[in-house]
């Protein structure tokens, strides 16, 4: 289709204006507010004990969630692509559930299930492991909302590579474990990496599900998103909220940069 | 020596293999030839252990391998679409089976280099499969399969994904390689020319059954039935019988008809020349009978020159040999 110069310029202006107003302005505003008083104030604000604890907790949750999602995500993707078992269609639908269900619903249902009067309440009542209002609850909530990413990124790659390479490895004497380790995993590594990056970004940014199951004590059980929220709403420390938000954004941007770099590497090999 | 006995395999109610028994002598290059859906690939994959038979046994070199995993069968397998390990270099691809067997690094390197020289990929050690052409990838796959010194080499339509020229070159090359390496080789193909060109023995499959097994000449000359005849080489139908187009003689004049006792079918068929096509070395004459039957006759250029046919004229065609009722005995004796 040919468009006149005038139309082309109008379309570009509209698209850029849309992105600018909806994405660039809000983010730019926060950056401006954060660094308006100099970098020193920003650094002071993110070096308070509560901020350091929140950063650590966010990273700890990522560190627990990512390996679990990698192992179970790859296993689920393999089952969905290679397996033939009753209920496969159901599993397909269940994997997408976190996309459809609001995070706040996830939080409520976790309390219902793991709370002291829930089905699994025995874990806390008998063993003294605090699930809801403790780290396990936040991990469970984050796993729920990030579960589809690895599965959905790995699945199409598995479809694409087919079973020829794995069968070839078998005829060459490789056991199933050797085939998985030396053939299948390297073949899906880019899809897996992509899924991991998305998982990290989502885990860092999760708010709705986590706030329901966290006790929310500053310096103890606040993630970065909860810190932003409590500083703004509870402490009326707007500057602190901006600074924490900037830190959160910084991590997200870092993750996205990593993804772009990996993406470029993928297209060259 | 590979012995398959009473092999059966069904997918739902489709019988891919229907009581197949086949002996493949050691050191031969045998082609499994048949149309798609004939069960030839299923048979090959069953020999490899990539398919589990519903019934029957597979014995290789005296060992019953029916219930043995592909890893332990001592086979090399080459896939139609190469199945190259894309994330590995050519060297690592070929070395894969040896490194699984935990051979010494130096021994692996030497063997890989030797094999790459044999398959004509010397100097490609550090390339990735994506940097090779289709033909090169398939030669790499062959080197990879040969690296583990397999007792039998199984090739599943190995040249099917390549273009015609490369295909013809590669099968000549495979034949020479086989004459050097002498490993018992089974090749699946749907291309009769490929089978006739490269194999010592051909097993023709149709609908999950073996129609005939033999060397290329006897299969071509003495097909056991119409299916084998029409699958190996082109055929014309003359008076309802299959005849090779180059086994039909054309004459201008019909001599006095001598109908054999008990035969009501005249040996000669009246036909009109519809088209004359010169295909380089040979000449094809398309004919039509009064009954509306069409058939083609192949002849050499000198034969065509002697006859000096014209489009539109009427000739008499007879089967010079083959399955003509009167000549079937004579044909079989040739």
Image (cartoon, coloured by chain):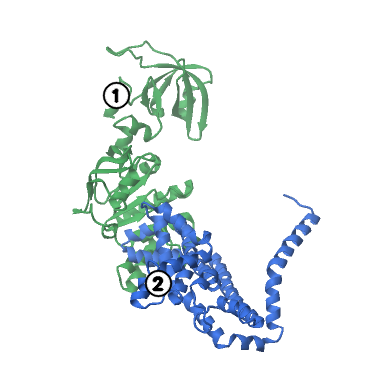
Chain colours: A blue, B green
Residue lying at 27% horizontally and 47% vertically, measured from the top left:
B53
Query: Element at badge 2?
Result: loop
Up-down relation of residue A42 to residue A192 (above or below):
below
Quadrant location, the C terminus of chain B = top left
Q: For the view shown, which residue lies furthest in the right direction? A: A6
Placement of B136 over or under A177, stated as above or below: above
Q: Is residue A15 visible?
A: yes
2 and 1 marks in contact (CB < 8 Å): no
Q: Mark 2 packing: few (<14 Cα in 10 Å), some, or many (20+)?
A: some
| Tally of numbered tags | 2
Residue B235 locus on image (x, y percent):
40, 29
- In the rendering, which numbered label is found on residue A116? 2
Residue at horizontal 56 percent and vertical 84 percent from the top:
A51
Nearer to us: label 2 or label 1: 2
Which percent across, then down, holds residue B112? 37, 66
* Residue B328 image label: 1
Question: Is A147 left, or right, of A178 in this rendering?
Answer: right
């Amino acid at each position: 289709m040919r468009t006149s110069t005038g139309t082309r310029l109008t379309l570009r202006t509209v698209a850029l204006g849309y992105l600018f107003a909806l994405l660039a302005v809000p983010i730019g505003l926060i950056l401006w507010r954060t660094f308006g008083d100099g970098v020193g104030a920003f650094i002071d604000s993110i070096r308070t004990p509560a901020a350091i604890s929140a950063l650590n907790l966010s990273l700890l949750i990522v560190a627990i969630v990512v390996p679990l999602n990698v192992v179970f995500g790859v296993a689920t993707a393999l089952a969905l692509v290679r397996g033939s078992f009753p209920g496969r269609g159901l599993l397909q639908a269940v994997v997408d559930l976190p996309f459809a269900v609001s995070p706040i619903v996830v939080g409520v249902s976790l309390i219902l299930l793991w709370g002291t009067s829930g089905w699994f309440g025995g874990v806390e009542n008998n063993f003294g492991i605090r699930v809801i209002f403790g780290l396990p609850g936040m991990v469970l909530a984050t796993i729920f909302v990030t579960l589809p990413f690895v599965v959905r990124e790995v699945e199409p790659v598995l479809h694409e590579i087919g079973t020829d390479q794995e069968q070839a490895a078998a005829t060459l004497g490789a056991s199933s474990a050797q085939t998985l380790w030396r053939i299948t995993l390297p073949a899906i590594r880019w899809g897996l990496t992509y899924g991991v990056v998305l998982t990290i970004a989502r885990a860092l940014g999760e708010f709705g599900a986590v706030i329901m199951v966290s006790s929310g004590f500053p310096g103890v059980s606040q993630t970065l998103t909860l810190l932003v929220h409590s500083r703004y709403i509870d402490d009326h420390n707007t500057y602190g909220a901006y600074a924490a938000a900037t830190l959160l954004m910084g991590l997200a941007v870092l993750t996205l940069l990593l993804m772009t770099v990996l993406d470029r590497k993928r297209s060259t090999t | 020596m590979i012995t398959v006995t009473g092999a059966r395999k069904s997918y739902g109610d489709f019988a891919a293999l229907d009581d197949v028994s086949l002996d493949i002598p050691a050191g031969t290059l045998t082609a499994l030839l048949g149309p798609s859906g004939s069960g030839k690939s299923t048979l090959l994959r069953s020999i490899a252990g990539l398919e589990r038979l519903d019934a029957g046994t597979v014995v290789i070199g005296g060992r019953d391998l029916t219930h043995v995993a592909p890893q332990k069968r001592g086979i090399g397998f080459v896939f139609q679409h190469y199945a190259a390990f894309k994330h590995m270099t050519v060297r690592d691809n070929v070395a894969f089976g040896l490194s699984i067997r935990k051979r010494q690094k130096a021994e692996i390197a030497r063997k890989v280099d030797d094999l790459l020289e044999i398959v004509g990929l010397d100097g490609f050690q550090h390339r990735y499969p994506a940097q090779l052409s289709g033909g090169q990838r398939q030669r790499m796959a062959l080197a990879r399969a040969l690296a583990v010194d397999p007792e039998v080499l199984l090739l599943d339509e190995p040249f099917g994904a390549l273009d015609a020229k490369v295909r013809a070159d590669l099968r000549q090359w495979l034949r020479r390689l086989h004459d050097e390496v002498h490993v018992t080789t089974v090749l699946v193909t749907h291309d009769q020319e490929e089978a006739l060109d490269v194999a010592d023995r051909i097993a023709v499959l149709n609908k999950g059954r073996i129609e005939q097994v033999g060397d290329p000449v006897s299969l071509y000359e003495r097909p056991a039935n119409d299916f084998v005849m029409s699958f190996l080489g082109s055929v014309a139908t003359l008076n309802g019988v299959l005849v090779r187009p180059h086994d039909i003689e054309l004459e201008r004049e019909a001599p006095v008809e001598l109908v054999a006792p008990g035969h009501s079918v005249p040996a000669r068929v009246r036909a009109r020349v519809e088209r004359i096509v010169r295909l380089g070395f040979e000449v094809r004459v398309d004919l039509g009978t009064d009954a509306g039957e069409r058939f083609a006759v192949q002849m050499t250029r000198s034969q065509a020159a002697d006859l000096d046919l014209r489009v539109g004229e009427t000739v008499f065609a007879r089967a010079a040999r083959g399955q003509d009722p009167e000549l079937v005995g004579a044909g079989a004796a040739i």
